[in-house]
Amino acid sequence: STTNALNLYKNASQGSPSSHTPANATLKIEDSVNTMYLDGNSIITTGTAAFTMGNTAAADLIMYTNAVARLTIDSSGNAGIGTDSPSDYYSDNLVVKQASGAGGITIVTDTSSEGALYFADGTSGNQRYEGGVGYNHSINKLFLVSGGQSRVFIDSSGNSTFAGDIMPSAE
């Protein structure tokens, strides 16, 4: 046994954090603005300040499930899902890795909305979406954005519409 350990035991409730209550908490930590409760394997916070988790040293933040690292935010601020070394990749701000088999990212929206991935070079006007790829569910069209405008559309039948001139290759 560890001589400097603090051990707390209680029959904590089971289930999602929404089913846990402060009354069942094993440990309560509070200051003048916020209260944090530890209940079984859940952390519940109340108060008006943001819930903050991290390390003030140059160290990675790693989340595990089933004894395997699933999410890593490295000391440079790069995030990796399925990799513990997102900075090893060329475009490393967010890396999603599937070790074997098919992998990907899914953007889910309702049937009357669009989902998109945009490329920005600013925070105002069309700088927020200078380039992109998206899908509009209400009209079932894929679209490509360039220069802040939708330029190419592909409908659910495979028909394509181009905005602007179609230029021959400059080979």
Image (tube, grey):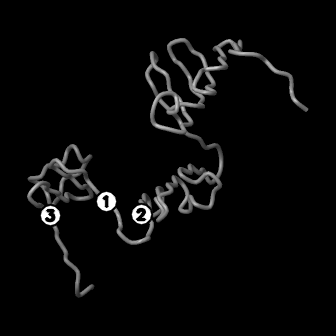
Q: Of the two numbered discs 3 and 1 on the same chain, state the one appearing first in sequence.
A: 3
Q: Are marks 3 and 1 in contact (CB under 8 Å)?
A: no
Q: Secondary structure at mark 1?
A: loop
The amino acid type of the residue labelled 2 equals Leu
Q: Calculate the distance from the C-alpha at mark 3 to the C-alpha at mark 1.
A: 17 Å
Q: Are marks 1 and 2 in contact (CB under 8 Å)?
A: yes
Instruction: Residue under label 2, please give it.
Output: 61
Q: Residues within 10 Å of mark 2 (few under 14, many from 20)?
A: some
Compared to residue 91, the image places residue 138 above or below, namely above
Instruction: Residue under label 3, please give it.
Output: 27
Front-lying residue, 136 or 90: 90
In percent of width and height, residue 105 lies at: 55, 39
The amino acid type of the residue labelled 1 equals Met
Compared to residue 96, the image places residue 145 above or below, namely above
Task: Give the left or right position of residue 100, taking residue 60 as reference.
Answer: right
The amino acid type of the residue labelled 3 equals Leu
Report the residue at 11% width, 61% height from top.
31
Instruction: Residue under label 1, please give it.
Output: 53
